[in-house]
Amino acid sequence: MNIIGLVVLLLCSSASLASEWHITDVGSHEALYFYDAATLRHNESTITVWLSVYANPKTTNRVAMLKEKDEINCTSGQDRVLEVVSYDTDERILERVDTPTKWKEPVPDTMGDRLVNEFCKADFDPHDTESLVPDPASRSKWYFDSVNERQSQKKH
């Protein structure tokens, strides 16, 4: 292995160790939602965390993934987006917006609503996602099929 390959391998390994992504939801359009437990920060009554949304490549035009930094106010039960980065199917950045949105109450019975309710619990364990995941295996087969399909296309 040459020195450049070794450096890339080490950088990728250390980067993956820094994040701790956990699935939180499978959306109605088969989007997968994750949060990074390693970025979860409590500050008095607010919580900040990075979220990631993977879109079904068969239902999207350009954006394959979004990463967003959210802030949750546990006192008011509101949340807002602090930063959003969108990526294409080759994981190239399409756009980065770092203008915070206004505080708002999440729509009932949505992923945002579940995150506010779960993250603000006094006994919330960021490593235990059972209360957040509504059976992802049954609805995320498309994601794993599309990953396998892309990998086989790259080999040819």
Image (spheres, rainbow, N blue to C red):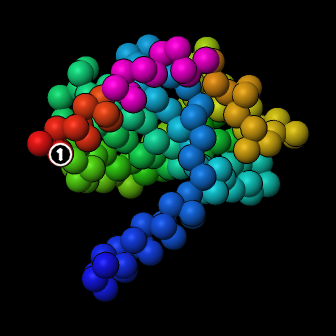
Q: Is residue 26 above or below residue 64?
A: above
Identify the image quadrant of the N terminus: bottom left
Q: Is residue 2 above or below residue 155?
A: below
Between 145 and 70, which is closer to the camera in this rendering? 145
Q: Is residue 140 magenta?
A: yes
Disc 1, SS = helix
Question: Residue 85 at what x, y percent from top left?
Answer: 35, 50
Q: Identify the magenta region.
A: 135-145
Q: Is residue 94 above or below residue 9?
A: above
**Residue displayed at 51% across by 70% down:** 14
Between 149 and 113, which is closer to the camera in this rendering? 149
Identify the image quadrant of the C terminus: top left
Q: Is residue 75 visible?
A: no
**Residue displayed at 43% across by 51% down:** 83
Between 84 and 61, which is closer to the camera in this rendering? 61
Q: Is residue 134 magenta?
A: no
Looking at the magenta stretch, what is its main secondary structure? helix
Which residue is situated farthest in the front direction here?
1
**Residue displayed at 64% across by 25% down:** 133
According to the image, label 1 marks what residue? 155
